[in-house]
Amino acid sequence: MPTRRPYPSDLSDARWELIEPVLSAWRLERRGRALDFGRPPEHDLRDFMEAILYVDRTGARWRCLPHDFPHGNTVYGYFATWQRDGVSAQLNGLLRQLLREREGRDGEPSARVIDAQSVKTSTGVPTSGQGTDAGKKIVGRKRSIVTDTLGLLLAVLVTAARVQDSVAGTRLLDQVAAEHPGIRKVWGDGGYRRHLVAHAAALGIDLEISARTPGTRGFIPIPKRWTVERTFGRLMLHRRLARDCETLPARSEAVIHLAVTDLMARRLTGENTISWRDPVNPHQPQVSG
């Protein structure tokens, strides 16, 4: 158990029990590949995960982590290594399967929803990795995600904002078709053009464009697509995602994977998803995760 005063972003024991086996297996495999086991780790894996979740929740810089966490450079090193080794995506996949089974669904989905979100970038992001979304007038990056019909993340791709939805969608369809061969149905919005429908058909997937009824005004939720919009809204509870702050797009994808892991772990344990606005105020409404 940690001896420091806990932060609102810290893991409960129940959530740590869900995450710990994956991280422990990763550490054991890494040490097994070394010529010798070397000195024992100075910090517990839980310390690193809670430090990463602190950054994810609060939007703090790695170098600005509170001093009762491990050093920011070390924490970022673990975060980057987990991204390269696929640990972040593995955690997302494990908890998604557990949550689907708890909801009475098959562990592997057969239908999904695709959408994209353009966000501004921080000053530390290289200009070569940015672009302008002409439709939304946003200079930055684009997050394209695929979720199942429960809103659980299946895949994410981060590109420059200038990349067309259909181009990013083609890459996502290829990725998800390879990782989830049982997918047969996909819903998307009008930004996904006809050639993507043809590409999906070649993969054995029926891509249906769900558009607003002509002449409607204001915000009207569209069935099926609402689940992916809700996922984007829940991701915004993590201030690190209010802008894209990562130098590499792959690291941006890892931040999203870990944010979703945090949300799903809370759903599995029945804990509320904290709001960064004022989690201590009992009168502040909180969003169930």
Image (spheres, rainbow, N blue to C red):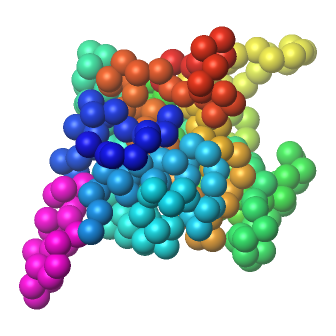
- Relative placement, left or right, of 170 versus 283 is left
Please determine whether, in this image, residue 133 is positioned above or below residue 29: above
Q: Nearer the viewer, residue 141 or 68?
A: 68
Q: Quadrant of residue 92?
A: top left
Q: State which region is magenta.
A: 23-41
User: Is residue 106 visible in the rendered structure shown here?
Assistant: yes
Which residue sits furthest bottom? 35
Q: Quadrant of residue 140?
A: bottom right
Q: Residue at x 57, y 19 (%)?
A: 287
Q: How many marks?
A: 0
Q: Position of residue 105 (x, y in %)?
A: 29, 20
Q: Nearer the viewer, residue 132 or 172?
A: 132
Magenta stretch contains residue 28:
yes
Q: Position of residue 240 (x, y in %)?
A: 63, 50
Q: Position of residue 45 (x, y in %)?
A: 29, 56
Q: Position of residue 106 (x, y in %)?
A: 25, 25
- Relative placement, left or right, of 218 versus 170 is right
Q: Residue at x 31, y 17 (%)?
A: 103
Quadrant where the image shows the N terminus = top left
- Relative placement, left or right, of 174 versus 189 is left
Please determine whether, in this image, residue 73 is positioned above or below residue 231: below
Q: Quadrant of residue 86?
A: bottom left
Magenta stretch contains residue 93:
no
User: Is residue 178 visible in the rendered structure shown here?
Assistant: no
Q: Residue at x 32, y 23 (%)?
A: 269
Q: Residue at x 40, y 46 (%)?
A: 4
Please determine whether, in this image, residue 136 is positioned above or below residue 77: above
